[in-house]
Amino acid sequence: MYEFPFHTQDLSKLSFLVTGGAGFIGSNLVDYLLKYKAGKVVVLDNLSTGYLKNLEFHSSNKAFQFIEGDIRDLQTCLDACEGIDYVFHEAALGSVPRSINDPITTNQVNIDGFLNMLVAARDSKVKKFVYAASSSTYGDSKKLPKVENEIGRPLSPYAVTKYVNELYADVFGKTYGLKSIGLRYFNIYGPKQNPHGAYAAVIPLFITNLIEDKASTINGDGGQTRDFTYIENAVQANILAALSDNEEASNQVFNIAVHERNSLKVIYESLQKIANSNVGPVYGPDRIGDIRDSFADITKAQTYLKYDPKVKIQDGLKRTFNWFKDNAEFILRQ
């Protein structure tokens, strides 16, 4: 992965903080930064949903530092940001169902923790704060494709928290001059995504079940659509956002997707073919708080960030399936 860099700058003189860096997206970002010789990469993670094994390859790298800590503690955030040039804020408590089951903790991590990180970034005078926003912000809007300045009402506590993040980042830009960029992720998938637990994402869950000849449950009729986005595209967006010298891109939010619309049923059938499996899905009830259709207009990211998602859905599914098949032992340790 990352055969070609997404940046032109010399990273060896720069320092980066990745919150949630032991998780799926965060650890892939760390992999990229250290592959291209970043001067310093600090990970802050409380390991509630992340795993040290996602970072074990870097344990002997002198440029790498791991801090076990919680973004709900302001002093921890201040310490982690000291001497940092760029912050990638990936730490969050994800999952719409989780937020419905536990809105209090979701709020504490995603809003209180986010505000702590903004304060720490401001006080440490970081050059840019790039954060994980979410397509859930579009809520009940029926408009397709989704355009950044047209959102609906949130459908879950999780969606509320991610929208509040955008509002806080905007205020910190206007009030304190903190440069930030929010990336509205659309269903990111790929290597190192956790397939286990009640809140597992559908693609790693489908893949591991197919490998083990188990049936997967599709919530609803399978006709709901998503703009599934391979992890390499998300990493590209983060690197471009952090290192962009386009001042017009600062204090904006961008859709990060592929501009491909596929139903869950089609995704499952594609994975069936890749796995050469006859195991079909079973269908369950709709999930509360789910958006029926999600499809992104990525024109703004293409224009301002020069975002160019190279990995399309069929290639991404094959890469992801092969990674899970080749890393069965790694997955079992999660």
Image (cartoon, rainbow, N blue to C red):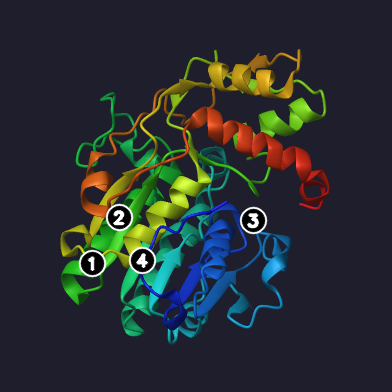
Amino acid type assigned to the residue bearing label 4 in the image? Thr
Precedes in sequence: disc 2 or disc 1: 2
Rendered view: 80 above or below 308:
below
Instruction: Measure how far apart labels 2 and 4 are at the Cα level.
Output: 28 Å
Residue 65 in the image: state x and y as whole percent: 61, 79
Disc 2 is placed on an element classified as: helix
- The residue that mark 4 highlights is 8
Q: Is residue 315 left or right of residue 240?
A: right
The residue type indicated by label 1 comes to: Asp
Q: Which residue is mark 3?
A: 49
Label 4 vs label 3: CA separation?
33 Å
Would residue 83 appear left or right of 331 to someone viewing this image?
Answer: left
- Whichever of callouts 2 and 4 sits on the residue coming sooner in the sequence is 4
Viewer-proximal residue among 172 and 61 = 61
Mark nearer the viewer, 2 or 1? 1
- The residue where tag 2 is placed is 166
The crowding category of the residue bearing disc 3, from other C-alpha atoms within 10 Å (few below 14, some 14 to 19, many at least 20), is some
**Residue shown at the point (21%, 58%) measured from the top left:** 249
In the image, residue 125 sits, relative to residue 286, either above or below, namely below
